[in-house]
Image (cartoon, helix red, strand yellow):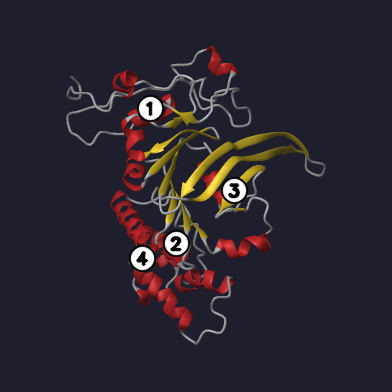
Amino acid sequence: MSEPLVRVRDLVKHFPITRGIIFQRQIGAVHAVDGVSLDIMEGETLGLVGETGCGKSTTARLITRLLDPTSGTIEYRGHDIAGMSKKELKPLRREMQMIFQDPYSSLNPRKTVGSIIADPFVVHGLDDGKPNGWLKTQVQELMEKVGLNPEHYNRFPHEFSGGQRQRIGVARALALQPKLIIADEPVSALDVSIQAQILNLLRDLQREFGLTIVFIAHDLSVVRHMCDRVAVMYLGKVVELADSDDLYAHPRHPYTGALLSAVPVARPGLKRRRQILGGDVPSPTNPPPACRFHTRCWKCQEVCTVEEPHLEPKPGGNLAACHFPLTDGEIAERVGAVSGQPAGA
């Protein structure tokens, strides 16, 4: 994890809101991603967490250029891919693959599993000039690698369980031996017992192939298990970035503290102090000025409403975008990992 594989700087994605059928005019925009800057180090697993609609999946799709950014730069191995054409991007797409959230909708139901996993080889012409049976052998080896029966090569997606379908998605992502994999909530649609299997599979594959993974999830306990570093997003911006252990032990942004206070405690008889946030998440079409969290923050002061905080080092080393970061005393009092009293005491 010595050199960044990807550098993202001031990344912005606004989706226009238009009115009219024939003559459309823009009446606003959804600020899905609004100035995200982060480095993805080679060989690490970087977690992206936050509430629904905060911009996690949009950020992931921008990094892989499945979406075109409104502005900003995305450097992959030193090359800015933000403005590249589809033709220029094609060789790089072999190195950047994605595992999608829903294993039921991300696989073509009209194709066999063998055809689905073989598609990356065919699209990039890797099967040209190869002997008969080469492609089938490659696909079956991938199926075996992710824990599927190679003899099920000719089955269709509906003949597999949800966990098996996600393994098919993993095999497809691995086909071209990528350097970077974006895992967009890959286990959220699966049963808990199956989630553990898929997570362990991803960790094993990362060690075997030296993968760099961007892991998007809602479940903070899963993120802690999987990730080396964690970026917390709120309303299109990264509000805190830190090593996983540091972030869970000493969150500095009040929003991070509130998220962690909601994580269930796996210790019977003990309860966690819960920090309840007031109000609802503001609309991304009209985000609050300055600090976007100030409308729900218990530490808000006047400066928070007029001056936007920057992502910068705070006590303990975490990067946080907050004028009044949490102190150790506030972490113990408000986030306080665990109360020492039995539940109901």
Residue displayed at 56% across by 53% down:
76
* Mark with earlier residue (1, 2): 2
- Looking at marks 4 and 1 on the same chain, the residue that comes earlier in the sequence is marked by 4
Residue 222, picture quadrant? top left
What number is the disc on residue 74?
A: 3
Q: Of marks 4 and 2, which one's residue comes earlier in the chain?
A: 4
The reply to whether discs 4 and 2 touch (Cβ–Cβ < 8 Å) is: no
- Mark 4 surroundings: few (<14), some (14-19) or many (≥20) residues within 10 A: many
Residue at numbered disc 1: 257
Label 1 and label 3: CA atoms lie apart by: 30 Å
The residue most toward the right is 23
One can see residue 61 in this view: yes
| Residue drawn at x 60%, y 27% as measured from the top left | 287
Q: Nearer the viewer, mark 3 or mark 2?
A: 3
Badge 3: few (under 14), some or many (20 or more) residues near its Cα, within 10 Å? Answer: many
Whether tag 3 and tag 2 are in contact, CB under 8 A, the answer is no
